Image (cartoon, rainbow, N blue to C red):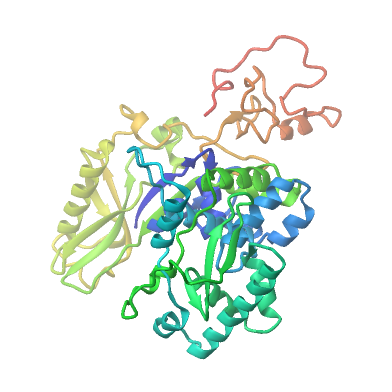
């Protein structure tokens, strides 16, 4: 199996993308390339990671708004809910819409000075740019599951609602207001949303329905124009159905990423909910993701095996280096023809290991464990199942002169056993107990990342074993430890 790992610490405007994209899409930013959870820090497992994402992504906006006292947050959420053509129910819906909205918002920069226009010219230019078409013609060309007559009926209901508001000297209605009014006459909310999405610069009867963002409130509003003068209609034969689909704008001078950062900070990082805080911490403690290509044994004229090496070393060398406790090398794939012999398989194992590992440049394979007692000239077809794992014993593996290259992290035999559940090096800062020499996270031991590791550190287990009267204060010091101590060389090492 081939596996590539990445450490995702990518950010956008101080937002951790593994948290933002995890809530929005259920996977990290690397998930688009099939990178999945590998392992977490501080004892975070795949199940805890997925549970944390589930908790955060299903937070309901209505409950958030109800519990909030910050009016700015409420207005920001309401503004984007009004902009959306679909209902935004959860924080996942909101974040996903805002991310997509960022890419749909045109960023137009023109350094050329524009001629000054009079109010009449500006009005004329706006009317020429806003090309209109009859809604009946548009509805006939839409690929809709609803009949054209039903679409036209909804459009008429919307116009009647706008007419009633206009009689009250109101210039426009928000999308939510139009939707709520239409629901009094039409029960299918999906049908209403579909029609509202298409109603911009369209002619219904003797009225023109416009849609624009209010520059003062930043809310998307529908308005009615009761005259067709100076309105340029598109040709009836046009097929440009998308001409009535609006270009999303969030208002003058607004920034989607600025609003997204604002909500990210207040709803997640500065939340008053202990559950949200814990879930956010869990996701942020998950930085390691990997993509795997599983081992495949194709049905062809070749045999494939996963090979591991068992060095032929003396018991004294094992005890001296402690390597007898370490895991064997990562398996390497061997490919040999169907007629290959035991000798050919040994030669393939030697070549693969020599080309891959520095310490095996002089490897000489003596035997194949699964073929012990089989002659060198015997064909392996039928004796070994293709796709299985084999182990070979050999000499010439350099375990001393290049000890720093033997294993990732060096030749030392580290033991990790932290109270958070971590049993292996996860890349986070650690400290070793000066009594039991077991490593644990500094954060879990009460040592802040900004603090220096104390010259003498005792883990909570050793403190408890020495005496029940001793109290572990996170630094490893107790009340009776007042005399100077000799610091071991490794006690101040940390990642």
In this orientation, which residue lies closer to the viewer: 158 or 394? 158
| Residue sitting farthest toward the top | 484
Tell me residue 242's x, y (percent). 39, 70
Q: Which quadrant of the structure image shows residue 391?
A: bottom left
**Residue at left offset 86%, top offset 28%:** 469
Q: Which quadrant of the structure image shows residue 181?
A: bottom right
Name the image quarter holding the N terminus. bottom left
Image-based side of 31 in relation to 344, left or right: right
Tell me residue 124's x, y (percent). 42, 57
| Residue sitting farthest toward the right | 469
* Residue 28 visible at all: yes
Q: Would you place residue 252 above or below residue 243 in this image?
A: above
**Residue at left offset 62%, top offset 24%:** 450
* Residue 423 visible at all: no
**Residue at left offset 66%, top offset 26%:** 435
Tell me residue 154's x, y (percent). 58, 82
In this orientation, which residue lies closer to the viewer: 475 or 187? 187
Tell me residue 433's x, y (percent). 64, 28
Q: Would you place residue 483 above or below residue 72 in this image?
A: above
């Amino acid at each position: 199996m081939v596996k590539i790992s990445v450490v995702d610490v990518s950010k956008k405007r101080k937002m951790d993308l593994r948290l933002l994209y995890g809530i929005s899409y259920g996977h990290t930013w690397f998930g688009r390339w099939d990178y999945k959870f590998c392992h977490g820090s501080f004892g975070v497992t795949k199940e805890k990671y997925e549970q944390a994402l589930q908790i955060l992504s299903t937070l309901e906006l209505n409950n958030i708004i109800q519990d909030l006292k910050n009016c700015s947050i409420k207005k920001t959420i309401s503004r984007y809910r009004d902009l959306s053509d679909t209902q935004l129910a959860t924080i996942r819906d909101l974040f996903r819409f805002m991310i997509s909205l960022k890419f749909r918002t045109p960023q137009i920069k023109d350094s050329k000075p524009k001629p000054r226009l009079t109010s009449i010219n500006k009005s004329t230019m706006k009317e020429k740019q806003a090309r209109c078409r009859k809604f009946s013609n548009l509805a006939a060309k839409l690929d809709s599951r609803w009949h054209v007559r039903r679409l036209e009926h909804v459009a008429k209901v919307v116009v009647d609602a706008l007419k009633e508001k206009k009689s009250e000297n109101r210039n426009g209605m928000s999308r939510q207001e139009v939707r709520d009014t239409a629901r009094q006459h039409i029960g299918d909310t999906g049908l209403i949303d579909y029609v509202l999405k298409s109603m911009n610069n369209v002619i219904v009867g003797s009225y023109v329905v416009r849609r624009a963002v209010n520059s003062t409130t930043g809310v998307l509003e529908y308005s009615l124009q009761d005259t067709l003068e100076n309105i340029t209609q598109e040709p009836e034969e046009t097929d440009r159905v998308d001409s009535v689909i609006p270009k999303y704008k969030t208002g003058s001078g607004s920034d989607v990423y600025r609003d997204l950062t604002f909500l990210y900070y207040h709803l997640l990082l500065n939340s008053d909910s202990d559950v949200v805080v814990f879930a956010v911490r869990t996701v942020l403690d998950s930085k390691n993701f990997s993509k795997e290509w599983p081992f495949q044994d194709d049905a062809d004229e070749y045999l494939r095996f996963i090979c591991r090496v068992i060095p032929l070393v003396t018991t004294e060398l094992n005890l001296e280096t402690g390597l007898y406790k370490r895991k064997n090398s990562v398996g390497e794939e061997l490919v040999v023809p169907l007629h290959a012999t035991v000798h050919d398989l040994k030669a393939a194992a030697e070549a693969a290991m020599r080309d891959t590992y520095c310490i095996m440049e002089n490897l000489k394979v003596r035997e194949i464990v699964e073929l012990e007692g089989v002659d060198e000239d015997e064909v392996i077809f039928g004796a070994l199942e293709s796709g299985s794992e084999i182990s070979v014993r050999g000499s010439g593996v350099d375990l001393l002169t290049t000890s720093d290259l033997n294993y990732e992290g060096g030749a030392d035999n580290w033991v990790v056993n932290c109270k958070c559940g971590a049993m292996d090096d996860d890349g986070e800062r650690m400290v070793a107990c000066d009594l039991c020499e077991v490593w644990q996270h500094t954060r879990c031991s009460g040592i802040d990342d900004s603090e220096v590791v104390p010259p003498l550190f005792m883990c909570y287990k050793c403190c408890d074993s020495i005496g029940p009267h001793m109290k572990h204060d996170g630094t490893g010091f107790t009340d009776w430890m007042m005399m100077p101590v000799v610091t071991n060389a490794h006690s101040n090492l940390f990642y």
